[in-house]
Amino acid sequence: MPRADWNLVSSSLISYPSNSDERKKIGQIIQLVNSRIHTQKKIIEQLETLIKVFREKIFSGTFRFKDEEGNNFNSWVPSTLENICHKESSNISANKIEDNFGNYIIYGASGVLRKIDFYEEENDYISIVKDGAGVGRLFFCEGKSSVLGTMEIIKPKLDVNVQFLFYQLSNIDFTKYVTGSTIPHIYFKDYKNEKVKIPSKKEQTKIANFLSSIDEKIETEKKILSQYELQKKYLLANLFA
């Protein structure tokens, strides 16, 4: 178990400003950056809570959209996942692409793995981790990309919006379908009979656009957070170099 022994750490040499005013100014600057980082994290947390609440309300039927004339859309139609989407497999292994580099994204269990020189999927799709760590985790994948073989590809059938399908799947608790103790796994055959309700294509599009707009805002705020964290890292490196 690695640890930092005080007897060793206490003898390390550090730079320390002798002027108390300078120390105070340094502390204020660092506190300001920390405050911005804290606020930014709160903004992201609130947005993530917001999209979760809206997703639950939408798919429980307590929040509905209206058409261009202000009228309610038709009632949602009961169905199963098998009726609205299908799954495909990937045979790409991490070893196969070890020395492969290019411009096309390949997804792994944690999201974007890196970029390679080929792709297997032309259009947007959904992927789910089927084996190992992160099993059941969903990703909305951009077209002209690929996934590792540890993931399954889920594509919508006719008259189903791919983004709407992603949010509908995101509202399902997949942990109840996970099997295996040593290496947990989940497969389409296990959850294909999950019961769902499907609105009209127009309402699907409205739902997808609404939820994706919140997701885009979350990604924007995460980029701002990354900038603040880089500023802090740069600041500390230069102040205490």
Image (spheres, grey):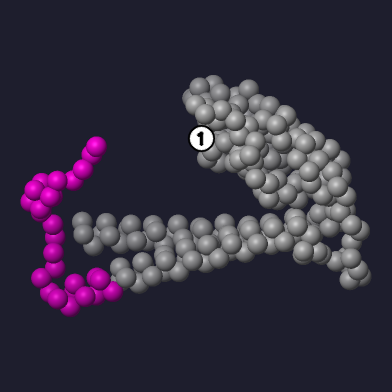
119 or 50: nearer the viewer: 50
User: Would residue 146 be seen by someone viewing this image from the given angle?
Assistant: no
Q: Quadrant of residue 71?
A: bottom right
Q: Is residue 19 above or below residue 181?
A: below
Name the residue: 82% across, 49% down: 197
Residue 240 lies, in percent from the top left, at 21, 59
Q: Label 1 crowding class (10 Å Cα cut-off): few <14, some 14-19, many 20+?
A: few
Q: Is residue 174 left or right of residue 71?
A: left
Residue 114 lies, in percent from the top left, at 52, 36
The residue under label 1 is which amino acid type?
Ala
User: Would residue 241 be seen by someone viewing this image from the given angle?
Assistant: yes
Residue 174 lies, in percent from the top left, at 64, 41
Q: Is residue 152 left or right of residue 196?
A: left
Q: Is residue 205 left or right of residue 149?
A: right
Q: Is residue 158 left or right of residue 229?
A: right
Question: Does dot 1 land on a helix, a strand or a loop?
Answer: loop
Residue 22 drawn in magenta: yes
Residue 202 drawn in magenta: no
Residue that mark 1 sits on: 133
Residue 123 lies, in percent from the top left, at 74, 39
Name the residue: 83% across, 50% down: 198
209 or 231: nearer the viewer: 209
Name the residue: 33% across, 57% down: 233
Give, as a single range, the part of the protein colored magenta. 1-28
Q: Is residue 136 above or below residue 27?
A: above
Q: Quadrant of residue 138?
A: top right
Give the position of the C terminus as an image quadrant.
Answer: bottom left
